[in-house]
Amino acid sequence: MQLTRRFQSAIAQSVIATTLLVSVAACAPTPTREGTGEYVDDAVITTKVKAAFAGDPTVKATQVNVETFKGTVQLSGFVDTRESAQKAVDLARGVKGVKSVKNDLVVR
């Protein structure tokens, strides 16, 4: 009977350890997927870039979409002038944490 309890305890510990290991591995980043911390960082960067756009009269914040992945900000949407597009890029580059800016803005 005592051997059975020890065996059950060992199995329970193995199951818990395996579950924790899988949980940690699931949160790990890959080249195409962010880890949990990176996702939060990118969300903060996106918010700061959008706030910078909202505070600038040159860039129409509602016309520019902002997405961030591992510190790279992608700008897309439509702007009225080339100057507006460049101002959006400059504002995004000025946000702390931005590693690079991909400009997919279209002037119409």
Image (tube, rainbow, N blue to C red):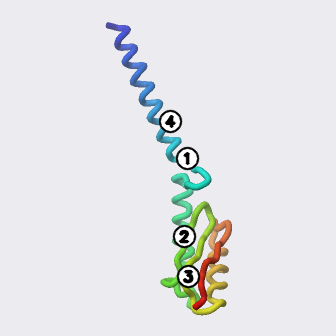
Task: Look at label 4 and name its amino acid.
Answer: Leu
Q: CA distance from mark 3 to mark 1?
A: 32 Å
Task: Look at label 1 and name its amino acid.
Answer: Ala
Q: Nearer the viewer, mark 3 or mark 2?
A: 2
Q: In the rendering, which numbered label is found on residue 28?
A: 1
- Mark found first going from the N terminus, 3 or 1: 1
Give the image location of residue 58, x and y in percent.
59, 90
Look at the numbered disc 1 and give the secondary structure of its residue.
Answer: loop
Tell me the residue that label 4 is attached to: 21
Give the image location of residue 22, x and y in percent.
48, 38
Which image quadrant is residue 69 in? bottom right
- Mark found first going from the N terminus, 2 or 1: 1
Tell me the residue that label 3 is attached to: 53
Q: Are marks 3 and 4 in contact (CB under 8 Å)?
A: no
Tell me the residue at 51%/41% (across/down): 24
Seen from the viewer's position, the closer of residues 48 and 62 is 62
Q: Quadrant of the C terminus?
A: bottom right
- Mark found first going from the N terminus, 3 or 2: 3
